[in-house]
Image (cartoon, grey):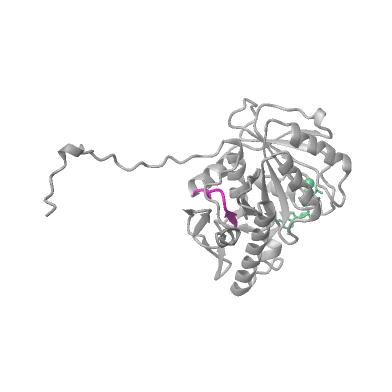
Amino acid sequence: MMLNPLKLHPSLRIQCFQIYSTKCFSRGLATTSEASQLQYASDLRFPTSSLSCHWDTVAPEPSQLRHASIFFEKQPPAFLWSAPKFKTMDFGNSPEVCFLGRSNVGKSSILNGLLGRKIVHTSSKPGRTKMMNAFAVGGSEDNGKNRLVVLDMPGYGKGGRAEWGTQVLKYLGKRKQMKRAFLLIDAEHGIKKSDMHLLGLFKEQSIPYQILLSKVDKVLFDGKRNPSQGALDFRIAELQKTMESVLEMVQPNPEDSTCAIGEVISCSSEKWIDGKRLGVDFIRFAMLKAAGLEHRPVKKMAKVMDVIPFDQLPEFDMN
Ligand SMILES: Nc1nc2c(ncn2[C@@H]2O[C@H](COP(=O)(O)OP(=O)(O)OP(=O)(O)O)[C@@H](O)[C@H]2O)c(=O)[nH]1
Ligand SMILES: [Mg+2]
């Protein structure tokens, strides 16, 4: 399920984290992303293209991010259905991805950011989302092609209910169209015990999933005020450490095959950088990739040179 081209020792894997530079390394593979320093509010240098890390995947190219953005924005998203139980869900043929996490971690808010409009209910009170809610992106026709269905799930932990968990787990275990679960972890608090239960279940049932670090604005900024460059650099380094600990938790041994997608994306539904909510296009790309709907740039092949048969090679005087 997961590409694991090169196995590195954990200590080397940690060195592969590059959330700040123009080069992003996955295990043994180096990929360049567009220049990632943006002048943010006066002289503040802020990494735009990559507050994410990739250890088993390749960072998307700018053209892929553009395509993802257009896919999500070209048609308004459509609310499909709400279901309290797995058996009352109204399924179609389109590929699906779902958003999971502790209550109040920011699932519904980031979905509004991804879908480009306030279509999902949010609240500062944990336990706001009480049913499994489905939305369509990329078109309303359920022809199985060019349409992605996104599910906002109820949260677990404070304000959550056991029966919600039962139904969500049924969905995860039984639904064939489910291509990837996006598990949100609060960037400020990291992985909690209740998240560990879910991580164990993903592994046990081979459910493909990916971690998103939510509310990174709380880690990087002081509310509405901008930090000094030094403070921002320090906070980015702290965020990097959180990403490292996530990697160690989801895949402590690189030799282990796991259903975790080898990347972590940071996001915020509150902070806008360069006209976009932080991390949104990266998540959109990951959602499309999970469903096989991403843009795959055509790689230009090197020109085929005339091949000279061996017996026609000019003879060299080797003396
Ligand atoms: N600072 C900050 N606050 C956020 C962010 N995302 C969400 N919030 C706030 O966090 C609270 C919870 O957000 P929701 O999106 O409703 O969280 P949820 O995970 O859907 O919660 P449940 O539906 O209860 O499981 C709200 O008060 C949001 O305004 C973010 O990126 N940054
Ligand atoms: Mg919610």
Of all residues, the one furthest to the top in this rendering is 143
- Examine the residues drawn in magenta and state their main secondary structure: loop
State the residue in front, 197 or 140. 197
Q: Which quadrant of the figure contains the N terminus? A: top right
Q: Is residue 57 located in the magenta-colored stretch of the structure?
A: yes
State the residue in front, 13 or 82. 13
The image shows residue 198 at horizontal and vertical percentages of 77, 46
The image shows residue 75 at horizontal and vertical percentages of 61, 36
Q: Classify residue 192 as left or right of residue 263.
A: right
State the residue in front, 250 or 232. 250
The image shows residue 81 at horizontal and vertical percentages of 76, 32
The image shows residue 250 at horizontal and vertical percentages of 68, 51
Q: Is 311 located above or below residue 212 in the figure?
A: above
Of all residues, the one furthest to the front in this rendering is 319
Q: Is residue 53 located in the magenta-colored stretch of the structure?
A: yes
Residue at coordinates 83% horizontally, 41% vertically from top-left?
165
Count of numbered labels shown in the rendering: 0
Q: Which quadrant of the figure contains the C terminus? A: bottom left
Residue at coordinates 71% horizontally, 36% vertically from top-left?
135
User: Visible in this render: residue 155?
Assistant: yes
Magenta-highlighted residues: 52-61
User: Visible in this render: residue 269?
Assistant: no
Residue at coordinates 56% horizontally, 61% vertically from top-left?
12
Quadrant position of residue 288:
top right
State the residue in front, 250 or 277. 250
Quadrant position of residue 239:
bottom right
